[in-house]
Image (cartoon, helix red, strand yellow):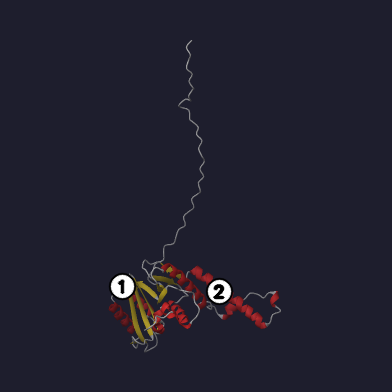
């Protein structure tokens, strides 16, 4: 007999072959949060130019923001009237009944101060009275400001305190502050519009002496002499009795032009004595030979 060769039966080709598939776990995709567009300088804005050491823009931004927020709390902590502040006083605890009138008054003042400070902090946070505008230029920062911040008085007070030895938040790399009351496009019409706004009420009483200080950065459209002549004409229209005095002015008209934007403000004559708001020079004056 012939031995038959045994073969293993193979499954029919039309039958599906079962495969073990590994179950894959996937995390559901989180909806992407819409980011607000970066802040830019727009016509009608107010703010503060800040210059700093090269390569220290990031650190300077943090330090300046801390300084500004601290001064916003100092200067605008007493905006409410006395009656409104007193009405916010919390009720006395039982433990306070045995204290003297002076102690109770001191306690109330302390608690009222805490309430006012917390309200100013939350208000500043919610309303974003300071907003950093990112620039692609070294050594230059810009902080947009909103009410109640008034950039000229705000910067002037910071520099006055620095000269007077008042303790402040440390700004190691910051140099100059330049407050701007109004911003516009860097054109003749833009310059005229900021003049109309800033000089609407004039620059002071009759006979006020003034000087014009223009600064131009990365800009070649408007010329320095052109700016001075236009601003001087607008000043004369706002008050014919105003006089030019470059050495000892009562007020200084600042015009800052940066690329395609410009701004203007009128600062007190003490601007010159305050090192033109150069914080570094006020704190550590350059020795004169």
| In-front residue for pair 184/158 | 158
Res. 88 in view:
no
Mark 2 or mark 1, earlier in chain: 2
**Residue 109 at what x, y percent from top left?**
61, 79
Task: Tell me residue 240's x, y (percent).
Answer: 33, 87
On screen, residue 40 above or below 264: above
Q: Which residue is drawn at the image coordinates 68% and 74% (left, top)?
A: 93
Q: Position of residue 215 (x, y in %)?
A: 33, 76
Compare residues 168 and 89 and report the one nearer the observer: 168
Q: Which mark is residue 262?
A: none
- Residue 189 shows in the view: yes
Residue that numbered label 2 is attached to: 117
Q: Would residue 169 be found to the left or right of residue 135 on screen? A: right
Label 2 sits on a secondary structure element that is helix
Please tell me in which quadrant of the rendered image residue 275 appears.
bottom left
Residue placed furthest toward the top:
1
Secondary structure state at the residue bearing disc 1: loop
Q: Classify residue 83 by image quadrant.
A: bottom right
Give the number of the disc on residue 187: 1
Which residue lies at the image location 57% right of the left edge and 80% below the top edge? Answer: 82
Identified at 35% across, 77% down, the residue is 255
Q: Residues within 10 Å of mark 1 (few under 14, many from 20)?
A: some
């Amino acid at each position: 007999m012939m031995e038959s060769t045994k073969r293993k039966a193979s499954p029919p080709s039309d039958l599906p072959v079962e495969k073990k598939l590994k179950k894959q776990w996937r995390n559901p995709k989180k909806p992407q949060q819409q980011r607000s567009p970066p802040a830019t300088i727009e016509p009608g804005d107010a703010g503060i130019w800040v210059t700093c050491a090269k390569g220290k823009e990031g650190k300077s931004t943090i330090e300046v923001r801390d300084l500004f927020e601290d001064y916003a709390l100092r200067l605008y902590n007493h905006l409410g009237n006395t009656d409104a502040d007193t009405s916010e006083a919390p009720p006395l605890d039982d433990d306070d009944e045995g204290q003297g009138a002076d102690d109770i008054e001191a306690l109330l003042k302390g608690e009222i101060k805490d309430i006012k400070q917390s309200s100013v902090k939350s208000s500043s946070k919610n309303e974003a009275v300071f907003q950093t505008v990112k620039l692609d230029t070294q050594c230059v920062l810009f902080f947009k400001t909103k009410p109640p911040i008034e950039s000229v008085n705000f910067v002037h007070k910071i520099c006055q305190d620095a000269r007077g030895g008042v303790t402040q938040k440390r700004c190691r790399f910051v140099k100059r502050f330049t407050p701007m009351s109004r911003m516009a496009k860097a054109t003749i019409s833009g310059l005229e519009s900021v003049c109309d706004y800033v000089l609407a009420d004039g620059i002071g009483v009759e006979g006020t002496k003034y000087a014009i200080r223009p600064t131009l950065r990365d800009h070649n459209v408007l010329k320095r002499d052109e700016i001075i002549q236009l601003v001087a004409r607008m000043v004369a229209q706002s008050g014919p009795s105003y006089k030019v005095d470059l050495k000892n002015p009562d007020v200084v008209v600042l015009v800052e032009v940066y690329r395609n934007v410009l701004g203007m403000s009128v600062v007190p004559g003490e601007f010159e004595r305050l090192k033109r708001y150069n914080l570094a020079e006020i704190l550590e004056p350059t020795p004169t030979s």
